[in-house]
Image: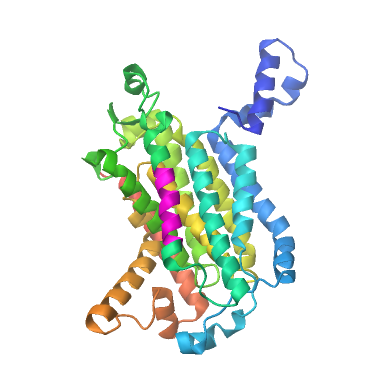
Amino acid sequence: MLPAIYDFWYTAFQAEQLAGHSGWAHTWSFLNLFQYVTFRAASAGLLAFIVSVMVGPRVIRKLISLKVGQPIRTAEEVHKLAELHGGKIGTPTMGGALIIGAVIVSTLICARPLNPFIAVCACTMAACGLLGFCDDYKKVKEKKSDGISSRKKMGWQIFIALVAASFIYFKTEISGFGASAKQVADGLAGYRLGDKSIDIGAICFPLFKFPLVNLHLLIIPFFALVIVGCSNAVNLTDGLDGLATGTTISVALSYAFLAYLAGHFYMATEYLVIPHNRYIGELAVFLMALVGAGFGFLWFNCHPAKVFMGDTGSLAIGGALGTAAICTKQELLLIIIGGVFVMEAMSVILQVGSFKLRKKRIFKMSPIHHHFELLGWHENQVIIRFWIISIMLALFGLALLKIA
């Protein structure tokens, strides 16, 4: 496994110490910090933020010069909402490329990029981002709000998710398959819950200090469902300036904390009794890079937005968060921590289902953030209140770790 760039300097520092030299090794003794996941995670978050803020204006100018303005649905399609969002016409989209770029750069510098958890999350994010880019490009080119057909988009999402799910299921360092019995028993491969190794197919929830059910091979389609569902949920949430970005920050920060705890043997197996994997702590670096990139993008995406993330960003973020939830073995907890995403997706499902079955609408408009807009809430009120809900749900989800 290739080390991070930081590890190169730390290894050289150790070599100098072992050789008994007191030159630059003493001067640069702070390099000892590079061995800690916490330091590298904080560095990744800060670096991603700096990259986003510094590169952001250039990206926005480039998008404006390419005339990739976000197509806004007409009054015939959304009625009164068209009046509320009329000022957004021409705002450049595809800004999600800035988030993806900042996360990838920070991860390559601060993390161990070939760590299996880092690799699968980063690749899923990039693949979903590429799909979103194709969708955004089609919308901009045809100047319509309809991009790639829903069937084709869903097909590609399922394909990406199944590849990621299969990797997680069969990769030795994650699942323990292919490792010796002693390695698994010693916690050197696969997951542990308390003093027992657990199968990758096990479904866990913090309230229960034992696996709820073991799906075995059926866990692959379940993993794919989580990734596709999360990706689409974030996409539906991305309808107001900064709404999806701010919610992403609270969810990614929560899972960075979960990844760190799951990688800490004592905290995971003895104190909290949550699934532990010796390699998972590194994922906190990737997730903190996403947090930093989110803050950096929010710098330009807050109301009134200078750029939209588009499907390029929303599909990528959703894919990354869904994969991270799987990797930490806290898939069910995503329903709580990512409650705002779930609420947005469920509002669409309920609205469509009610209209088809009863010819009646439950909400004035879905996703639900538009419902509150049409009730008279100002856009900023909707955004900030949804952020507050997201933070509260994240705190509640984390609080469940030590109950029982």
Vertical arrangement, residue 210 with respect to residue 16, above or below: below
Residue drawn at x 59%, y 63% is 298
16 inside magenta stretch: no
Q: Is residue 38 left or right of residue 206?
A: right
Magenta-drawn stretch, dominant element (helix, strand or loop): helix
Residue 47, position in %: x, y? 65, 47
Q: Is residue 175 left or right of residue 242?
A: left
Asked whether residue 159 is drawn in magenta, I would say yes
Q: Quadrant of residue 14?
A: top right
Which residue is pictured at 60% across the width and 42% down the height? 107
- Tell me if residue 276 comes above or below residue 389 in the rendering: above
Instruction: Please give the range of residues in magenta.
Output: 153-165
Nearer-the-camera pick, 25 or 87: 87
Query: Horizontal and vertical percent for residue 345?
Result: 37, 66
Q: Indicate the position of residue 95 as horizontal and vertical percent values.
A: 62, 63
Q: Is residue 205 visible?
A: no
Residue at 51% across, 36% down: 282
Q: In the image as oriented, which residue stretches furthest toward the right?
A: 23
Quadrant for the C terminus in the image: top left
The answer to which of 33 and 198 lies nearer the viewer is 198
Quadrant in the picture for the N terminus:
top right
Depicted 355 relative to depicted 127: above or below: below
Q: Can residue 255 be seen at all in this image of the molecule?
A: yes
